[in-house]
Structure formats: C-alpha cells, structure tokens
Amino acid sequence: MPDIILHGTATLAHSISALLKRWPGPVRRVACRFAGMVFMPSTLFVHAAREGDAIEFETRNDPGETVISRGRLLLE
C-alpha cells in the first residue's frame, strides 16, 4: 500500500451513517461493491436517491473516484 487507507467496512459505515441522517429508520439490508481505496485523510461524498424503502447510493473520494458502487440500503 502506498499510504494508510480506510478499511472498506469503515467506508461503508460512514456512508450508511450519512444516509441515515437524511433518511432515518431501521435498516433491513445493505449491499454494495467495494470499488476503490480511500487514502487517509480523506473526505467522502455519498450520492443517493430514494425510491420507497430502497436507497441506491454511490460513495466517492476526494478526487471523485468511486470507492463504493452499486450501494443499496433497504429500510424497514
């Protein structure tokens, strides 16, 4: 590794926390594809759209590279 990275599950946890601030509720299921690395320090940007109980999302790092793709959060 060229530098310190944020673990994928920590990246996912930060993404889900951001989504739940906007759309609070109990989580039923989470799915995603880990697509890139997050070098520390970094700022994450979560792009999302909600339709019913499903939230589709993607997370990008500082340079705009996708680090989580095909994210899907199902609420109860």
Image (cartoon, rainbow, N blue to C red):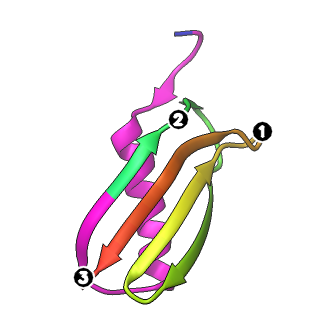
For numbered disc 1, what is the local secondary structure? loop
Q: CA distance from mark 2 to mark 1?
A: 14 Å
Residue denoted by label 2: 35
Taking the spot 56% from the left edge, 31% from the top edge, the residue there is 36
> Which of marks 1 and 2 precedes in the sequence?
2
Label 1 crowd (10 A; few <14 / some 14-19 / many >=20) = few
Q: Find the magenta span and give its range.
A: 2-30
**In the image, residue 24 above or below residue 7:** below
* 9 vs 71, nearest the viewer: 71
Task: Say which amino acid is labelled 2.
Answer: Ala
Residue 63's label in the rendered image is 1
Residue denoted by label 3: 26
Q: CA distance from mark 3 to mark 1?
A: 32 Å
Task: Say which amino acid is labelled 1.
Answer: Pro
> Which of marks 1 and 3 precedes in the sequence?
3
Task: Say which amino acid is labelled 3.
Answer: Pro
